[in-house]
Image: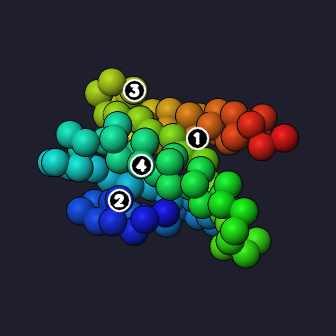
Amino acid sequence: MDPGIYKHAPVFRIGGDEFAVILTGESYAQRDALLSDVYETFSMTYSDMARNPWERFSAAAGMAVYGRDGTNYEEVFNCADGRMYANKVEMKKRLS
């Protein structure tokens, strides 16, 4: 992932290979475009057969918005987590 995608937002490692990003201000306003950039960056990296195998990587991602997808931390987190797992399933279908 381009480290500049979330350069104005804190990124937290929440366990193993899972991360959470908290968006505010301009980053929050651009949240859909930022997530699209994440998907595009990982897709390009993984499909670039000119890279060494250890340089090709992928990741699933999901996003939820406080107020729209839940009214507390647990609801919002669970919604984003569910979307991330749905994205993972879709990725596996495309890569098979």
Name the mark on residue 69.
3
Given the image, on which type of amino acid does mark 1 rest?
A: Met
Measure the alpha-carbon separation of dots 3 and 2: 23 Å
Measure the alpha-carbon separation of dots 4 and 1: 15 Å
- Which residue ends up furthest to the left in the rendered image? 25
Q: Can residue 81 be seen from the camera position used here?
A: no
Are dots 2 and 1 in contact, CB under 8 Å?
no
Image-based side of 26 in relation to 56, left or right: left
* Nearer the observer, 18 or 96: 96
Given the image, on which type of amino acid does mark 4 rest?
A: Asp
Viewer-nearest of discs 2 and 1: 2
Residue behind mark 4? 37
Are dots 2 and 4 in contact, CB under 8 Å?
yes
Are dots 4 and 1 in contact, CB under 8 Å?
no
Mark closer to the chain start, 2 or 1? 2
Q: Which element carries disc 2, helix, strand or loop?
A: loop
Mark closer to the chain start, 4 or 1? 4
Viewer-nearest of discs 3 and 2: 2
Residue behind mark 2? 5
Q: Residues within 10 Å of mark 4 (few under 14, many from 20)?
A: some
Measure the alpha-carbon separation of dots 2 and 4: 7 Å
Measure the alpha-carbon separation of dots 3 and 1: 14 Å
Residue behind mark 1? 84
